[in-house]
Image (cartoon, helix red, strand yellow):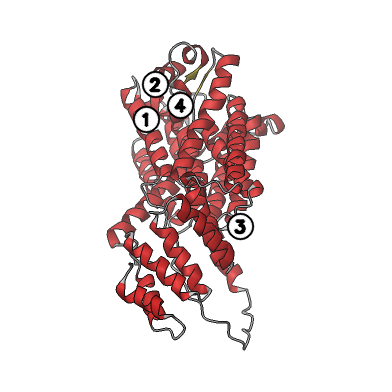
Amino acid sequence: MALLQEGAPSRSFVIARTIAAFCLNLIAATSGLSSLGRDGSRLIHVHWPWMSIVQRQFLMSIVCAALAAFCVSKFWSTTTAKWVWIVPLPFLLVRMAIYSVHPTPGSAMQSLDPGLHYGLWRHFFSPDLSRDYQGFADFVVTTVTVRATIYSLTAWALARWERSRLGDHSIEPTSDQTSPMKPAFWPAPKLPWFSATNLLIGINLAVFVAMVVSGDSFFSSFFFPGSAQLVHWGAYQGARTLNGEPWRLITGSFLHWGFDHLATNMILLWWIGRITEKIVGPLVVTGVYLFASIGPALLKAALHPLSVSAGASASILGITGFLIAIVFHGKVKPPHSQMFNWRLAIFIFLFLVAIISPNVDNFAHVGGFATGLLLGLIFVNSLRASSPHRIFLPTRLFEARNAIEKEDYVRAIEQFQVCVEADPKAAEPHALLGYSFHALQRYDDAAREYKLAQALGYTNEVINNHLHEISNSSVTTEDGKAMVTGGLS
């Protein structure tokens, strides 16, 4: 089946997208899986108490960076991921050069024997973290650099391994028999940048920036905001929620306990939100995000009225539960099934890690996931009952496109006809319905639907070519040719 490639994006758009991808990879490298690193450090201390805190920090930095690179390589692209090391490494080298000329007062360098030559290494790679001196800040810079470097190396190695694996596949000889030519099929439009998922991420980022800017201390607000600050901005707290402040049921899902918490959640929301939005559309994704926040927050307000919690984790797990319901119960095949399976496996792994982690609101996690799962079951049952409501239009379009890819045109026609009934003024279902008729060589029906789509404002060069092909076909009726050349009556 022939696919028509979309027009090449503008150079400025490509540059902006590359910069955005690089920034997201940099965040994933330096802050991704941060909660796993803290919990892993505690676990190592229990089983290997002889390891110092510095050794544990480096070990978990390497493990988390490699895992983050693996996740991104499976879910996204390594085009910019392999260059992340460029940002922190020169900064570390410049900092080391400055320090070698003028050691920080009060640091370990001054207490060393002048005859020894490992003071610089010790200051940056093995400081005494129990002391309050500048070496701690330099160690943080060193750790970030190590994470970014390991992240880049892992992404580069995985990309090379993937290319070598694909290159080993032998090409099967093609059959001498030629199948009937199908009309060219245009690809589905890509999810726009102004999507529901990106809007939710933008709101989370904007709220965090506003909270940090308004805080008394930038450092504490950025990394360790206190409960009082979060409550002031609308965090979950049952006593306030049940006494005249119900808006906390929603606002709490847009607040986070520091940048690490925010970065981890936004990366997960990006991964799971966009794939869900492609299947069910922006309204459903937004609704699930909000309802998965309200459900567990309302129940927790009644059971634990004095506790304070915040974060988008419950909403993200709600979207995950919703997606699991429509994929496994609703039998909706997700795009890139192998990628989806990897994402699901990683989500389950992170979910299990979160359960055993301290200071994690497991009640909200389980409640959000259960809420999303329940909403997904309700959605699927209504969808399979052939409900004509417009809320199901994106999912029906998605399923019908999958049917076209499988060349199951009869099934596609059934889905598109339901879409047209639900929203007669939607142009895309008419265009795709015309394609399905065209593939079955029902040229008169195809011409009618193509022209309807054009009349509703659907512009596509492929449709013009198909109409020209139909008008020149020897099997098209005179009425069909008149419809192509004369328009709709």
How far apart marks 3 and 2 lie (CA) works out to 40 Å
Q: Which residue is mark 3?
A: 338
How far apart marks 4 and 1 lie (CA) works out to 13 Å
Q: From the viewer's perspective, is 27 left or right of 440? A: left
Q: Secondary structure at mark 1?
A: helix
Q: Which residue is mark 2?
A: 233
First of labels 4, 1 by sequence position? 1
Please tell me the numbered disc located at residue 250.
Answer: 4
How far apart marks 2 and 1 lie (CA) works out to 9 Å
The amino acid type found where label 2 is placed reads Trp
Please tell me the numbered disc located at residue 302.
Answer: none
Please tell me the numbered disc located at residue 207.
Answer: 1
Q: From the viewer's perspective, is 301 left or right of 5? A: right
Q: Nearer the viewer, mark 4 or mark 1?
A: 4
Count of numbered badges drawn on the protein:
4
Q: Which of the pair 52/240 is nearer the observer?
A: 240
